[in-house]
Amino acid sequence: MSQEPTRHPLSSSRRDFLRGTGIALAVPWMESLRGPWAKRAFGAGTSNAAHSAEPPRRMAVLYVPNGMHMPNWLPKQVGPLDSLPPTLKPLDSLKSEFNILSGLALNGGRAQEDGPGDHARALASFLTGAHPYKTRGKDIRAGVSVDQAAAAEAKDKARFASLELGCDESAQAGDCDSGYSCAYSSNISWRTPNSPLAKETDPRAVFDRLFGPSGDAGHSEAVHRQQNRSLLDFVTDDARDLQSRVGGSDRRKLDEYLYAVRDVERRVLEIEKPSDDPRVPKGFTRPDERPKDFAQHVRLLMDMMVLAFQSDSTRVITFVYANEGSTRSYPEIGVDSGHHELSHHHGNAEKQAGISKINAFHVSLLAHFLKRMRDVKEGSGSLLDHSMIVYGSGLADGDRHDHANLPILLAGRGGGTITPGRHLHYQRDTPLTNLYVGMLKRMGSSDDKFSDSTGELKDL
C-alpha cells in the first residue's frame, strides 16, 4: 500500500486535522494558531476557527421531557443566584455560569383548538415556536428549528453544520400522543417545516462520525477496530510535529484534548465488549451498542459533545434526554415509577417527590456537561464562556400541561455578551422565541425575528 506523502501539519491540503491512514482528527482552537503569524507558519488553508482572533461561538440545546416540578425549580428571588432551590442544587458550584429565565412561554405548544397532545406539541414547538399540524400520518408540519437556523449561519465554518443527539430513538410515523404523529414527540430539530432530523443515539456512531475521514463513519472503525489499535496511534507523528510548533499552553491544551479523545474511545469500546452468552459466536458484539445505564449513556454522549465543540467539528448541537411522554423509570435513584406517570401527580406528595428526584438527577447530568465545558480552557476563557447552552422543557408543570413560565436555564457567556449568575424574570407569556432571536444574532444572524417572536430578550 502506498503511503500518504508527508505534509506539514495544518497545511492547506490538511486543513485543521491530524491525519493517519483512514483517520482525521480535528484539532482544538489554540492561541498559537491565531492571526497572520499562524498563516505564515502553518499555511493559508487552515480553518476559520484556527485563524480567528477569538474562539468561535457555539450553541447547544438540552431538552428534558414531561415538564418540571416548578416549586423545586424556580429560585425564590429575582436577581443574583444565591441559595439554589432543590432541583438546581447539583449546580451549586456553577452558580456563576448560568441564568434562570422565568416567565417565558411556548404558545405553539398550546392546544389552539386541537385538543389533547401537549407532549407532542411541547417538543415539536420547543425550538420551532410553531404549532404542529395535528396528524398521525405523513403530512407532518411544524417549522424550521432555531438550531437549524443557527447551523445555516455556521455551515461553512465547521465540519458539521449541526449534531442531533439523544438517548431515545427518533420516529417518523405512528400515533404517539392523542392523534399527533410520533415524529412530533421524538424530534426536536427540524430542517424544514416538513423534515425533522433524527437523533443519533449510538455513542459508537457519534464517535466514528466525529473522527472518521471527512465525516464518513465507518472508516476509522475499519482501521482501528480491526487492528485493535487506538485511532490516536495513527496520528502520533502529526501530533508530535504540531506539539513542537505551538506554545507551552497550547501543548498542554493539545495533550488534554488527545487524552479526552482516548478516554471517550476507551469508554465506547468498553460498552462493545464481546458478549459472554455462549450462544453468541465468538467475537460478535451485542446488538445493542448503547449503554444500558442511563447516566453512563448521557455522560458519554455529553463528553462527545464537548469534543465536538472543542475540535470545532460543529458549533450547533441538540440533545434530548428522552422523548416526550417518556415512561422511563429511574431505579438507580430510587424511583421505580415511570416519569410520565409521576408527572401527573394530581398534588400527591409522594409523586411530587419522585418527579423532583428525576428532575434533580437530570440536572446533575447537566452539571457534568457544564463542568467539562468550563474545564476546557480556550483563549482567555473557557469553552463554556464562548458558548450558549439552553436547558429546559416545553412544559412547565407536567400535571397541568402548562406551556407558560417554562423551566429555562441559559448557561455560558456567549463570547462575553451574556452575564450569568442571575434569575431573570420576564413578563408572563413572553415568547421563548425572543430568547432565540438574541442567540441567533450572537451566532451571526442579522434577522430581528424568529417564528412567533415579538422582539429580542432584554437584560441578558
Image: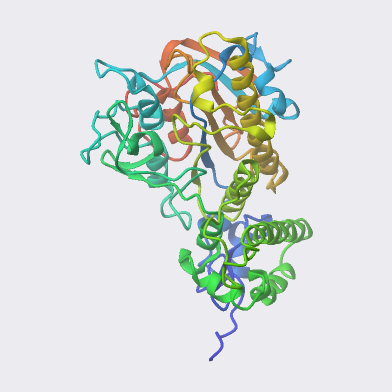
Q: Residue furthest bottom?
A: 1
Tell which of 339 and 405 is nearer to you. Answer: 339
Q: Is residue 407 above or below residue 147?
A: above
Q: Residue furthest front?
A: 279
Q: Residue at x 41, y 52 (%)?
A: 155
State the quadrant of the C terminus: top right
Q: Is residue 171 above or below residue 115?
A: below
Tell which of 381 and 302 is nearer to you. Answer: 302
Give coordinates of residue 175: x percent, y percent: 30, 34
Tell me where residue 211 sits by quadrant: bottom right
Instruction: Judge from the rendering whether residue 182 lies leftward or rightward of residue 361; answer left or right.
Output: left
Tell me how many marks there are.
Answer: 0
Q: Residue at x 44, y 12 (%)?
A: 400
Give coordinates of residue 28: x percent, y percent: 63, 57
Q: Does residue 254 show up?
A: yes
Q: Does residue 188 show up?
A: no
Q: Residue at x 55, y 59 (%)?
A: 204
Q: Is residue 306 above or below residue 411?
A: below
Tell me where residue 369 sits by quadrant: top right
Give coordinates of residue 373: x percent, y percent: 66, 42
Q: Residue at x 22, y 41 (%)?
A: 138
Q: Is residue 412 above or below residue 82?
A: below
Tell me where residue 187 sits by quadrant: top left
Looking at the image, what colour scheme do you see? rainbow
Tell which of 425 and 233 is nearer to you. Answer: 233
Tell which of 6 and 73 is nearer to you. Answer: 73
